Image: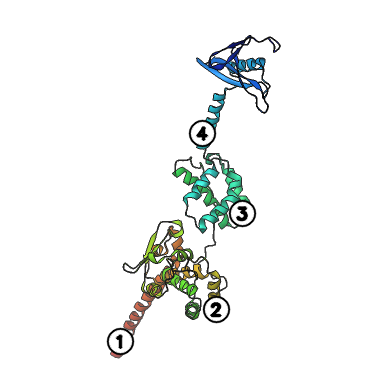
Amino acid sequence: MNDTKKETETKHKKGRIKVEGYQGVFYRESKRIGKSGIEKVYYVVFKKNGKLIEEKVGRQYADDMTPAKASLIRGRLIEGNIDTRREKKEKKDAEKQAEDNRWTFDKLAVKYFGSRPDNKSRKIDQGRYEKFLKPLFELKQPSEIAPLDVDRLRINLLKAKSPQTVKHVLNLLTWIVNFGTKNNLCPGLAFHIKKPEVHNITTEDLTPDQLSSLIKIIDDNQHLQAGQMMKLVLFTGLRRGELFKLQWKDINYDRGFITIRQPKGGKDQQIPLNPSARNLLQDFPKLGPYVFTDKDGKQLKQISREAKRIKEAAGLPEDFRPFHGLRHTYASMLASSGQVDMYTLQRLMTHKDPRMTQRYAHLRDETLQKASNLAGEIIGQIGKKEHDKVVGMTSKGK
Protein backbone atom coordinates (compact mmCIF):
# COMPACT_ATOMS: atom_id res chain seq x y z
CA MET A 1 0.00 0.00 0.00
CA ASN A 2 1.62 3.32 -1.07
CA ASP A 3 1.69 6.83 0.44
CA THR A 4 -1.06 8.12 -1.89
CA LYS A 5 -3.59 5.89 -0.16
CA LYS A 6 -6.12 7.88 1.81
CA GLU A 7 -5.33 7.68 5.52
CA THR A 8 -8.13 7.06 7.95
CA GLU A 9 -7.09 8.45 11.27
CA THR A 10 -8.27 7.09 14.57
CA LYS A 11 -7.55 8.55 18.00
CA HIS A 12 -5.61 6.11 20.17
CA LYS A 13 -4.55 6.02 23.81
CA LYS A 14 -1.53 8.12 24.90
CA GLY A 15 -2.36 10.68 22.22
CA ARG A 16 -1.31 8.45 19.37
CA ILE A 17 -3.21 8.59 16.10
CA LYS A 18 -3.31 5.31 14.18
CA VAL A 19 -2.64 5.34 10.46
CA GLU A 20 -5.15 2.99 8.86
CA GLY A 21 -3.73 0.54 6.36
CA TYR A 22 -0.34 0.42 8.09
CA GLN A 23 -0.26 -2.05 10.93
CA GLY A 24 1.43 -0.78 14.07
CA VAL A 25 2.12 2.70 12.63
CA PHE A 26 1.04 5.76 14.63
CA TYR A 27 1.88 9.41 14.86
CA ARG A 28 1.58 12.28 17.25
CA GLU A 29 1.26 15.89 16.30
CA SER A 30 4.06 18.19 17.36
CA LYS A 31 5.29 21.70 16.70
CA ARG A 32 7.33 21.79 13.50
CA ILE A 33 11.08 22.18 13.93
CA GLY A 34 12.56 25.35 12.44
CA LYS A 35 9.27 26.58 10.96
CA SER A 36 5.79 27.49 12.07
CA GLY A 37 3.00 24.97 11.99
CA ILE A 38 2.48 21.37 13.02
CA GLU A 39 4.09 18.14 11.78
CA LYS A 40 3.53 14.46 12.40
CA VAL A 41 5.99 12.47 14.49
CA TYR A 42 5.75 8.79 13.49
CA TYR A 43 5.99 5.83 15.88
CA VAL A 44 5.77 2.10 15.40
CA VAL A 45 4.51 -0.46 17.89
CA PHE A 46 5.46 -4.14 17.84
CA LYS A 47 6.21 -7.10 20.07
CA LYS A 48 9.71 -8.46 20.56
CA ASN A 49 10.64 -11.24 22.97
CA GLY A 50 7.15 -11.03 24.44
CA LYS A 51 7.42 -7.32 25.17
CA LEU A 52 5.41 -4.53 23.59
CA ILE A 53 7.79 -1.91 22.23
CA GLU A 54 7.03 1.60 20.98
CA GLU A 55 9.76 3.15 18.84
CA LYS A 56 9.98 6.67 17.45
CA VAL A 57 11.04 6.46 13.78
CA GLY A 58 11.04 10.05 12.52
CA ARG A 59 9.37 13.38 11.88
CA GLN A 60 7.20 14.22 8.89
CA TYR A 61 9.27 17.14 7.60
CA ALA A 62 12.54 17.10 9.52
CA ASP A 63 13.19 13.43 8.64
CA ASP A 64 10.99 13.18 5.52
CA MET A 65 9.13 10.36 7.24
CA THR A 66 6.00 8.79 5.75
CA PRO A 67 3.69 5.96 6.89
CA ALA A 68 5.23 3.61 4.28
CA LYS A 69 8.79 4.32 5.47
CA ALA A 70 7.67 3.89 9.07
CA SER A 71 6.08 0.52 8.20
CA LEU A 72 9.27 -0.61 6.46
CA ILE A 73 11.35 0.33 9.52
CA ARG A 74 8.89 -1.55 11.74
CA GLY A 75 9.42 -4.70 9.70
CA ARG A 76 13.21 -4.42 9.96
CA LEU A 77 12.95 -3.86 13.72
CA ILE A 78 10.81 -6.97 14.12
CA GLU A 79 13.26 -9.05 12.06
CA GLY A 80 16.16 -7.70 14.11
CA ASN A 81 17.93 -6.13 11.12
CA ILE A 82 18.17 -2.84 12.97
CA ASP A 83 18.26 -1.98 16.66
CA THR A 84 15.74 -0.07 18.68
CA ARG A 85 16.85 3.10 20.43
CA ARG A 86 17.05 1.21 23.71
CA GLU A 87 19.14 -1.54 22.13
CA LYS A 88 21.48 1.06 20.61
CA LYS A 89 21.85 2.72 24.01
CA GLU A 90 22.48 -0.61 25.73
CA LYS A 91 25.14 -1.49 23.16
CA LYS A 92 26.73 1.91 23.52
CA ASP A 93 26.75 1.59 27.31
CA ALA A 94 28.23 -1.90 27.03
CA GLU A 95 30.94 -0.63 24.67
CA LYS A 96 31.72 2.22 27.05
CA GLN A 97 31.88 -0.21 29.97
CA ALA A 98 34.17 -2.48 27.99
CA GLU A 99 36.38 0.49 27.12
CA ASP A 100 36.46 1.56 30.76
CA ASN A 101 37.54 -1.96 31.70
CA ARG A 102 40.13 -2.06 28.93
CA TRP A 103 43.40 -0.93 30.49
CA THR A 104 45.47 0.34 27.63
CA PHE A 105 49.13 1.13 28.16
CA ASP A 106 48.36 4.86 28.13
CA LYS A 107 45.65 4.56 30.79
CA LEU A 108 48.05 2.55 32.93
CA ALA A 109 50.76 5.17 32.41
CA VAL A 110 48.46 7.97 33.59
CA LYS A 111 47.62 6.00 36.74
CA TYR A 112 51.24 5.03 37.29
CA PHE A 113 52.63 8.56 37.07
CA GLY A 114 49.78 9.81 39.26
CA SER A 115 50.97 7.43 41.98
CA ARG A 116 54.54 8.79 41.95
CA PRO A 117 55.80 11.86 43.84
CA ASP A 118 55.88 15.05 41.79
CA ASN A 119 59.62 15.42 41.48
CA LYS A 120 62.39 15.70 38.90
CA SER A 121 62.65 11.92 38.51
CA ARG A 122 58.97 11.64 37.59
CA LYS A 123 59.23 14.48 35.07
CA ILE A 124 62.20 12.79 33.39
CA ASP A 125 60.34 9.48 33.16
CA GLN A 126 57.23 11.22 31.80
CA GLY A 127 59.39 12.74 29.09
CA ARG A 128 60.78 9.31 28.21
CA TYR A 129 57.25 7.89 28.12
CA GLU A 130 55.90 10.60 25.82
CA LYS A 131 58.86 10.36 23.43
CA PHE A 132 59.62 6.64 23.25
CA LEU A 133 56.78 4.50 24.63
CA LYS A 134 53.49 6.29 24.02
CA PRO A 135 53.79 6.44 20.19
CA LEU A 136 54.23 2.65 20.06
CA PHE A 137 52.03 1.27 22.84
CA GLU A 138 49.46 3.97 23.66
CA LEU A 139 46.33 2.03 22.61
CA LYS A 140 47.62 -1.48 23.28
CA GLN A 141 46.85 -3.54 26.34
CA PRO A 142 49.92 -5.16 27.94
CA SER A 143 48.69 -8.55 26.69
CA GLU A 144 48.80 -7.15 23.14
CA ILE A 145 52.46 -6.10 23.36
CA ALA A 146 54.56 -8.68 21.54
CA PRO A 147 58.23 -9.52 22.16
CA LEU A 148 58.97 -8.34 18.61
CA ASP A 149 57.55 -4.88 19.47
CA VAL A 150 59.97 -4.50 22.37
CA ASP A 151 62.91 -5.94 20.41
CA ARG A 152 62.36 -3.37 17.65
CA LEU A 153 62.16 -0.58 20.21
CA ARG A 154 65.42 -1.66 21.84
CA ILE A 155 67.28 -2.09 18.55
CA ASN A 156 66.10 1.25 17.13
CA LEU A 157 66.91 3.14 20.33
CA LEU A 158 70.42 1.68 20.52
CA LYS A 159 71.15 3.20 17.11
CA ALA A 160 70.89 6.71 18.55
CA LYS A 161 70.89 6.43 22.36
CA SER A 162 73.29 5.13 24.98
CA PRO A 163 72.70 1.70 26.56
CA GLN A 164 71.92 3.47 29.84
CA THR A 165 69.15 5.55 28.23
CA VAL A 166 67.69 2.49 26.51
CA LYS A 167 67.74 0.63 29.81
CA HIS A 168 65.87 3.52 31.49
CA VAL A 169 63.17 3.38 28.79
CA LEU A 170 62.74 -0.39 29.02
CA ASN A 171 62.70 -0.23 32.82
CA LEU A 172 59.90 2.32 32.60
CA LEU A 173 57.90 0.01 30.32
CA THR A 174 58.32 -2.77 32.89
CA TRP A 175 57.36 -0.54 35.82
CA ILE A 176 54.14 0.64 34.16
CA VAL A 177 53.00 -2.91 33.36
CA ASN A 178 54.00 -4.17 36.82
CA PHE A 179 51.98 -1.32 38.36
CA GLY A 180 48.90 -2.49 36.47
CA THR A 181 49.47 -6.10 37.48
CA LYS A 182 50.05 -5.21 41.13
CA ASN A 183 46.78 -3.26 41.23
CA ASN A 184 44.79 -6.00 39.45
CA LEU A 185 44.12 -3.80 36.44
CA CYS A 186 45.64 -6.05 33.80
CA PRO A 187 47.67 -9.24 33.29
CA GLY A 188 51.42 -8.84 33.01
CA LEU A 189 53.66 -9.39 30.02
CA ALA A 190 54.04 -13.01 28.95
CA PHE A 191 57.75 -12.58 28.27
CA HIS A 192 60.91 -11.15 29.84
CA ILE A 193 62.18 -7.84 28.51
CA LYS A 194 65.83 -8.08 27.49
CA LYS A 195 67.75 -4.95 28.48
CA PRO A 196 71.17 -3.81 27.26
CA GLU A 197 74.16 -4.26 29.52
CA VAL A 198 75.53 -1.03 30.96
CA HIS A 199 79.19 -0.68 31.85
CA ASN A 200 79.38 3.05 32.49
CA ILE A 201 79.08 3.12 36.29
CA THR A 202 81.53 5.74 37.52
CA THR A 203 82.75 6.33 41.05
CA GLU A 204 84.12 9.83 41.53
CA ASP A 205 86.69 10.47 44.22
CA LEU A 206 89.14 13.14 45.38
CA THR A 207 92.72 12.83 46.51
CA PRO A 208 93.62 14.14 50.00
CA ASP A 209 95.24 17.21 48.38
CA GLN A 210 92.14 17.93 46.26
CA LEU A 211 89.91 17.50 49.29
CA SER A 212 92.09 19.83 51.35
CA SER A 213 92.00 22.43 48.58
CA LEU A 214 88.21 22.17 48.33
CA ILE A 215 87.70 22.65 52.08
CA LYS A 216 89.97 25.70 52.07
CA ILE A 217 88.06 27.29 49.15
CA ILE A 218 84.72 26.54 50.83
CA ASP A 219 85.86 28.17 54.07
CA ASP A 220 87.09 31.24 52.17
CA ASN A 221 84.13 31.44 49.78
CA GLN A 222 81.54 34.20 50.15
CA HIS A 223 78.64 32.09 48.90
CA LEU A 224 77.80 30.52 52.23
CA GLN A 225 75.04 28.17 51.13
CA ALA A 226 76.85 26.45 48.25
CA GLY A 227 79.91 25.76 50.39
CA GLN A 228 77.94 24.56 53.39
CA MET A 229 75.81 22.30 51.22
CA MET A 230 78.96 20.74 49.75
CA LYS A 231 80.39 20.24 53.24
CA LEU A 232 77.18 18.64 54.44
CA VAL A 233 77.41 16.12 51.59
CA LEU A 234 80.93 15.21 52.74
CA PHE A 235 79.66 14.78 56.31
CA THR A 236 76.45 12.86 55.53
CA GLY A 237 76.40 11.63 51.92
CA LEU A 238 73.08 13.39 51.27
CA ARG A 239 71.92 13.72 47.67
CA ARG A 240 71.57 17.13 46.04
CA GLY A 241 67.77 16.86 45.88
CA GLU A 242 67.64 15.79 49.52
CA LEU A 243 69.56 18.91 50.51
CA PHE A 244 67.00 21.11 48.76
CA LYS A 245 64.12 19.32 50.56
CA LEU A 246 65.81 19.33 53.98
CA GLN A 247 63.80 21.20 56.62
CA TRP A 248 64.73 22.18 60.16
CA LYS A 249 62.03 19.87 61.49
CA ASP A 250 63.97 17.00 59.90
CA ILE A 251 66.97 17.65 62.17
CA ASN A 252 66.62 15.87 65.50
CA TYR A 253 69.45 17.10 67.72
CA ASP A 254 68.22 15.16 70.76
CA ARG A 255 68.19 11.74 69.11
CA GLY A 256 71.00 12.59 66.72
CA PHE A 257 69.29 11.78 63.42
CA ILE A 258 68.44 13.46 60.11
CA THR A 259 65.18 12.41 58.44
CA ILE A 260 65.41 12.13 54.67
CA ARG A 261 62.05 12.68 52.99
CA GLN A 262 61.36 10.22 50.14
CA PRO A 263 64.95 9.47 49.14
CA LYS A 264 64.91 8.67 45.41
CA GLY A 265 61.12 8.27 45.57
CA GLY A 266 61.32 5.69 48.39
CA LYS A 267 60.10 5.73 51.99
CA ASP A 268 61.37 8.28 54.51
CA GLN A 269 64.64 7.19 56.10
CA GLN A 270 66.92 8.36 58.90
CA ILE A 271 70.69 8.71 58.95
CA PRO A 272 72.88 9.61 61.95
CA LEU A 273 73.65 13.25 62.67
CA ASN A 274 77.40 13.13 63.30
CA PRO A 275 79.21 15.87 65.29
CA SER A 276 80.60 17.59 62.17
CA ALA A 277 77.14 17.85 60.56
CA ARG A 278 75.62 18.93 63.89
CA ASN A 279 78.12 21.79 64.32
CA LEU A 280 77.60 22.94 60.74
CA LEU A 281 73.81 23.00 61.04
CA GLN A 282 73.72 24.58 64.50
CA ASP A 283 75.81 27.51 63.25
CA PHE A 284 73.72 27.95 60.11
CA PRO A 285 71.17 30.84 59.97
CA LYS A 286 67.48 29.92 60.04
CA LEU A 287 65.62 31.98 57.43
CA GLY A 288 62.57 29.77 56.95
CA PRO A 289 61.30 26.20 57.30
CA TYR A 290 63.92 24.94 54.85
CA VAL A 291 67.57 24.66 55.82
CA PHE A 292 68.77 26.04 52.50
CA THR A 293 66.74 28.98 51.23
CA ASP A 294 66.83 31.81 48.72
CA LYS A 295 67.06 35.46 49.76
CA ASP A 296 63.32 35.54 50.48
CA GLY A 297 63.49 32.57 52.84
CA LYS A 298 61.83 30.21 50.35
CA GLN A 299 63.06 26.74 49.40
CA LEU A 300 66.28 26.84 47.40
CA LYS A 301 65.94 24.99 44.10
CA GLN A 302 69.13 25.78 42.17
CA ILE A 303 72.73 26.41 43.14
CA SER A 304 74.75 24.77 40.35
CA ARG A 305 76.49 27.97 39.24
CA GLU A 306 77.90 28.78 42.68
CA ALA A 307 78.97 25.17 43.28
CA LYS A 308 80.76 25.13 39.92
CA ARG A 309 82.70 28.27 40.87
CA ILE A 310 83.89 26.60 44.07
CA LYS A 311 84.87 23.46 42.17
CA GLU A 312 86.88 25.45 39.63
CA ALA A 313 88.56 27.57 42.31
CA ALA A 314 89.63 24.39 44.11
CA GLY A 315 91.17 23.05 40.90
CA LEU A 316 89.03 19.91 40.81
CA PRO A 317 88.72 17.88 37.58
CA GLU A 318 86.44 19.39 34.98
CA ASP A 319 84.12 16.36 34.90
CA PHE A 320 83.80 16.20 38.70
CA ARG A 321 80.19 16.81 39.76
CA PRO A 322 80.17 19.00 42.88
CA PHE A 323 77.36 17.27 44.76
CA HIS A 324 77.18 13.80 43.25
CA GLY A 325 80.97 13.54 43.22
CA LEU A 326 81.21 14.50 46.89
CA ARG A 327 78.59 11.87 47.73
CA HIS A 328 80.86 9.31 46.03
CA THR A 329 83.82 10.74 47.97
CA TYR A 330 81.92 10.30 51.24
CA ALA A 331 81.17 6.64 50.41
CA SER A 332 84.72 6.00 49.20
CA MET A 333 86.23 7.38 52.42
CA LEU A 334 84.05 5.10 54.54
CA ALA A 335 84.66 2.02 52.38
CA SER A 336 88.42 2.52 52.21
CA SER A 337 88.65 3.01 55.98
CA GLY A 338 88.10 -0.71 56.39
CA GLN A 339 85.88 0.02 59.40
CA VAL A 340 82.48 0.10 57.63
CA ASP A 341 80.84 -3.03 56.23
CA MET A 342 78.84 -2.90 52.98
CA TYR A 343 75.46 -3.29 54.68
CA THR A 344 76.12 -0.30 56.95
CA LEU A 345 77.34 1.72 53.97
CA GLN A 346 74.18 0.82 52.07
CA ARG A 347 72.07 2.11 54.97
CA LEU A 348 74.07 5.34 55.21
CA MET A 349 73.82 5.92 51.45
CA THR A 350 70.08 4.99 51.50
CA HIS A 351 70.58 2.69 48.52
CA LYS A 352 67.48 0.61 47.83
CA ASP A 353 69.53 -1.85 45.76
CA PRO A 354 72.65 -3.31 47.41
CA ARG A 355 74.23 -3.54 43.98
CA MET A 356 74.58 0.24 44.03
CA THR A 357 76.78 -0.04 47.13
CA GLN A 358 78.92 -2.85 45.71
CA ARG A 359 80.78 -0.35 43.50
CA TYR A 360 82.71 0.62 46.66
CA ALA A 361 83.43 -2.96 47.76
CA HIS A 362 86.80 -3.03 46.02
CA LEU A 363 87.99 -0.12 48.20
CA ARG A 364 87.18 -2.09 51.32
CA ASP A 365 88.85 -5.17 49.83
CA GLU A 366 91.99 -3.15 49.06
CA THR A 367 92.11 -1.88 52.66
CA LEU A 368 91.64 -5.38 54.04
CA GLN A 369 94.34 -6.65 51.70
CA LYS A 370 96.72 -3.95 52.92
CA ALA A 371 95.89 -4.83 56.53
CA SER A 372 96.49 -8.50 55.79
CA ASN A 373 99.79 -7.69 54.08
CA LEU A 374 100.78 -5.59 57.08
CA ALA A 375 100.07 -8.51 59.39
CA GLY A 376 102.26 -10.70 57.23
CA GLU A 377 105.04 -8.13 57.29
CA ILE A 378 104.87 -7.82 61.10
CA ILE A 379 105.03 -11.58 61.57
CA GLY A 380 107.82 -11.71 59.02
CA GLN A 381 109.84 -9.11 60.93
CA ILE A 382 109.35 -11.01 64.18
CA GLY A 383 110.46 -14.23 62.50
CA LYS A 384 113.51 -12.51 61.04
CA LYS A 385 114.53 -11.16 64.45
CA GLU A 386 114.22 -14.60 66.04
CA HIS A 387 116.25 -16.12 63.21
CA ASP A 388 118.98 -13.50 63.59
CA LYS A 389 119.05 -14.10 67.37
CA VAL A 390 119.49 -17.86 66.91
CA VAL A 391 122.21 -17.37 64.30
CA GLY A 392 124.02 -14.95 66.63
CA MET A 393 123.91 -17.36 69.56
CA THR A 394 125.20 -20.21 67.37
CA SER A 395 128.08 -18.07 66.17
CA LYS A 396 129.11 -17.24 69.74
CA GLY A 397 128.97 -20.93 70.70
CA LYS A 398 131.48 -21.71 68.05
Q: Residues within 10 Å of mark 3 (few under 14, many from 20)?
A: some
Mark in the foreground, 2 or 3: 2
**Callout 1 secondary element:** helix
Amino acid type at mark 1: Thr
Q: Residue at x 28, y 89 (%)?
A: 397
Quarter of the figure with the C terminus: bottom left
Mark in the foreground, 4 or 1: 4
Q: CA distance from mark 4 to mark 2?
A: 64 Å
Can residue 182 be seen here? The reply is yes
- Place residue 355 in its image quadrant: bottom left
Query: Residue 313: which numbered mark, if any?
Result: 2
**Which badge, 4 or 1, comes first in the chain's sequence?**
4
Amino acid type at mark 2: Ala
Q: Residues within 10 Å of mark 1 (few under 14, many from 20)?
A: few
Quarter of the figure with the N terminus: top right
In this view, 193 is above or below 275 = above
**Callout 2 secondary element:** helix
Front residue of 86 and 236: 86
Mark in the foreground, 4 or 3: 4
Q: CA distance from mark 1 to mark 2?
A: 65 Å
**Which badge, 2 or 3, comes first in the chain's sequence?**
3
Q: Residue at x 65, y 27 (%)?
A: 33
Q: Which residue is mark 3?
A: 158
**Callout 3 secondary element:** helix
Q: Which residue is mark 1?
A: 394
